Amino acid sequence: MKAQAGARIAVESVAKRFGELQVFRDVSLEVGGRELVTIVGPSGCGKTTLLRCINGLIACDEGRIVAEGETVTAPRPNMAMVFQHFGLFPWKTVFANVAYGLSLRGVAEAEIAARVPEYIALVGLQGFERAYPYQLSGGMQQRCGLARALAVEPSILLMDEPFAAIDAQTREILQFELLRIWERRPVTMVFVTHSIDEAVLMGERVVILKGRPSRVHEVVEVGLPHPRTRRTLSEKRFAEVREHVWATLMQEAREAQRIIRP
Amino acid sequence: MSGLLSRPALYRYGSLAAGLALWQLLGPKVDPLFFTYPSAIARAFYALAASGELAQYSLESLQILLYGMVLAVAVGIPLGVLMARFRPIDWTLDPYINALYATPMVALVPVLVLWLGIRMEAKVVVVFLFAVFPVLINTYQGVRKVDPGFVEVARSFGSSEWRMWRDVLLPWAVPYIAAGVRLAIGRALVGMVIAEFYTSISGLGYMIVRYAHNFEMDRTFVPVILLMFLGVALTAALRRLERRIAPWSRSDP
């Protein structure tokens, strides 16, 4: 499943530094139209930083990022991000949170009133329109975060460890629900995670970030068919890819241990 | 635990009742030129209320309090957000605000009266100066402490700075602003009374000065008690309002 409609996102030799710390260097990667690419790497490898660069929230020091033919310098209306910390406004109801992006774009009230329930239903939050985030469980909060991102109908969806703060069972449910949503309406998606299982289950390709400063160590073609379900998890191919990614990342973890304990 | 018969309430109201009883018992033993007691104050209150004098002076005071507070909120909140968001503005205004906030505002009252006269404008300005700093400083601090995650969300969705004020910064800062306004009300009452002492033509402050000069202690205490109730009532009303407009914030910063 390579890029069908040419690269939607092209990351070209990008480097980012925070003061003395070189987070990553010479990172290049392409994401095709309607492709779901996962980025996996050890904590601190800069995968979230890379995602923020792609979103235009922070500038990269070297190289450039091109999204749909234009260099990214600031957040663009065709992209939406789902955050690990959910980022739901506690003073807004579920409805108002989902409507947030639309209202920023100046969409008319009537259209908001028509479109928002559709996305609330898509993520299974019907009946909670008037609830406040603090009244929802973590999983439901992230459903709301997902609906908020989907509501602006982005052509590029950026997922920043969206399920990392959610309990294991809910997390699995949300993974498959997200897959259902994407299979029905595929958009270009970059999905950052530190979970190898999640990276392999969700991605069509898995980008492995490694090293200090980190760079793209390998891009693995997952090659698992859609729709992906719980049965995907017990397929031979899933185990193979999972082992491969695991071994690649563990090799670095072992090296890191050797440095700590000489 | 806020019922009338809960344990803390029992202690509170019990203490209050005991205090009042003691005052009522011992008060009459002191020379009435210098002291008074609850039942005498109640009688004076009734007399002043019946003559319409109390209502007239109260309304004058409330008007000044209202204008001064509205002005303080209207200036303090936007200026606080502005300073929190734009560092050069912060650095520019900071020395003046610090200096004025540190100055005992009472020291400025005679000067202000000299400049602005003894009419309402002078008193409104005094109330404003007493009240604006807690509002401004609390707003500033609230906005500075905004969760960067929310700012990131706003930027990611392409929010303008102004929309961010509306959607993120002000709602976030509501508990801080409310605490500032509560502080401001207490200070505004002080400012109001002092301004009325100095200008001595109207308001509850003037009532206090006039009756104290005549050694009418019972009548002097009427505006004092009224001011006390006003302070308590306004602060409580504000807490209520805060809980209504910010149901997500359960504790004070």
Image (cartoon, helix red, strand yellow):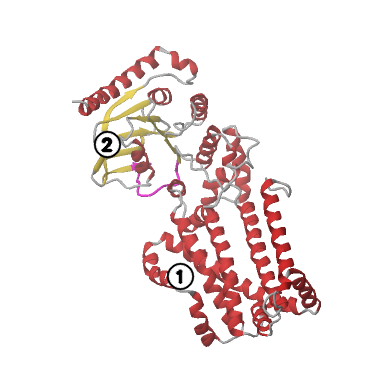
Crowdedness near tag 1: few (<14), some (14–19) or many (≥20) residues, C-alpha within 10 Å: some
Q: Which residue is mark 1?
A: B101
Residue B84 in the image: above or below residue A90: below
Residue, x 63% and y 76% (percent of image)? B64
The spot of residue A186 in percent (x, y) is: 47, 31
Highlighted magenta segment, given as a residue range: A66-80
Residue A235 or residue B6, whichever sits in front: B6
- Which chain letter matches label 2? A
SS class, disc 1: helix
Q: Which residue is mark 2?
A: A27
Report which quarter residue B215 is drawn in: bottom right
- Which chain letter matches label 1? B
Can residue A155 be seen by looking at this rendering? Answer: no
The spot of residue B35 in percent (x, y) is: 68, 75
What is the magenta segment's predominant secondary structure?
A: loop
Residue A75 lies in the magenta-colored region: yes
Residue B83 in the image: above or below residue B6: below
